[in-house]
Amino acid sequence: MQKQIRLNEDYQNQLRQEIEEASPFISDVTPVDILKAEYADNFKFSDCFEALQTRYKTVRRLRRDGNCFYRAYLFQTFEHFIINKTDTKQYLRFLKAIEGSKADLMALGYDEIAIEDFYDLFVAEVKKLPDISPAEAQQHLLKLLCNKEEAVYLIMYARFMTACYLKQNSILFEDFVGDVASFCMREVEAVDVECDHPQIIAITNYLGVGVEINSVGPKGNLEVIKLPEDADFDQGFRAKLLYVPGHYDALYQ
Amino acid sequence: MNSNAERRLLKDLKKMEAENENSGITATPDDDSLFRWRAVIFGPEDTEWEGGVFRLVLEFTDEYPNKAPKVKFLTKMYHPNIYNDGSICLDILSSMWSPVYDISSILTSIQSLLCDPNTKSPANNEAAELFSKNYKEYVQRVKEVVEASLLDDE
């Protein structure tokens, strides 16, 4: 039985490696038609596809490695700040949240040595955004967020900030997720663990950048959910995502 | 320039030196590699593990702290979650790994695992069964490895 468990682990590692080699971390922008073919068997999806197509023309596919939400969210948010240099209000709000995050985390009991390398890199990369020319946005971000070095640190720090908001506001979340500290351990801070609504509510509120999630509704209709719901977030940029169970991709108009 | 992993390992070392004089764990890197550490966990007082001196080895890669180290007991153990070869079945060392853990917290978790085994995912079936069904015999077997650990000074 011990052998069996280890074989299973080996098998899972092998599967993971195969997935990795089959797809890039973030694809180039591709016409949304590609989704139609991919989900041809899913009749609910094909019904709502036309509605999706009227809203979005292209998509960036994300690798299914447990980090797709965080990677897509960081990509679109960074991209927004590179391209829209005039959106200083939201950028400064974003930068301020990030600059305050190390103190916030330490106040919650995080050890400085565990977070500082992640924090330093995240702050440095966010501060670079205004100096990057819009023409270089794609090249810069594909390089930054598609590797096993910086990207790992940036995504992990996004997880820390998610946990930070969840813990600071534990009273709002404990009815849904149970003990917030153990939820963060299991479902937020563990490497490569997938992201669900509570995490999305947390990171978007913490950073002041919302998301708009497009998915297939229960009746086969296109469902568009905004998180956080507050109209305040409509004033600023929201990342545009496509959700199919267990996976997020990034959408473009 | 040191890699991220090396810088972090040096910080872990500093923390070990500062914090763990009386905590029943010690760990130091090998002279020739910062990526291989030897550690000792002392059996917690007032438990069946009291008096034991258990040696471990921790192996890190350049992906630390984003990947867990490999941790193994060198001392012969008898525990529901420790394999015969000394490897440890502990969630934070596999699927639940996070960079929030450092060497000190890894060893502290292993130390608490000694007295608080998880019999749902046994690595040593016999030990798991004795722990649940014949605790007295289990304690006896643990005391044997505790005694043997004192003679085991490689």
Image: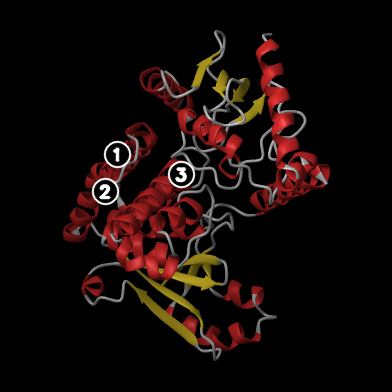
Q: Chain of mark 1?
A: A
Question: Residue A148, percent across and down?
Answer: 53, 40
Q: Residue lying farthest bottom? A: A219
Instruction: Give amino acid for label 2.
Output: Ile
* SS category of the residue bearing label 1: helix
Q: Nearer the viewer, residue A209 or B77?
A: B77
- Looking at the image, do the residues carrying marks 2 and 1 touch, with CB atoms under 8 Å apart? no
Which comes before the other along the chain, label 2 or label 1?
A: 2
Helix, strand or loop status at disc 3: helix
As shown in the figure, which amino acid type bears the numbered disc 3? Ala
**Mark nearer the N terminus (3 vs 2):** 2
Residue holding disc 1 = A124
Answer with the quarter of the image where residue B84 lies: top right
Distance between mark 2 and mark 1 Cα atoms: 10 Å
Labels in figure, total: 3
Q: Is residue B123 left or right of residue A252?
A: right
**Point 30% across, 53% down: residue:** A82
- Residue picked out by circle 2: A98
Amino acid type, callout 1: Ala
Name the residue nearer the viewer: B87 or A243.
B87
Residue at numbered disc 3 = A151
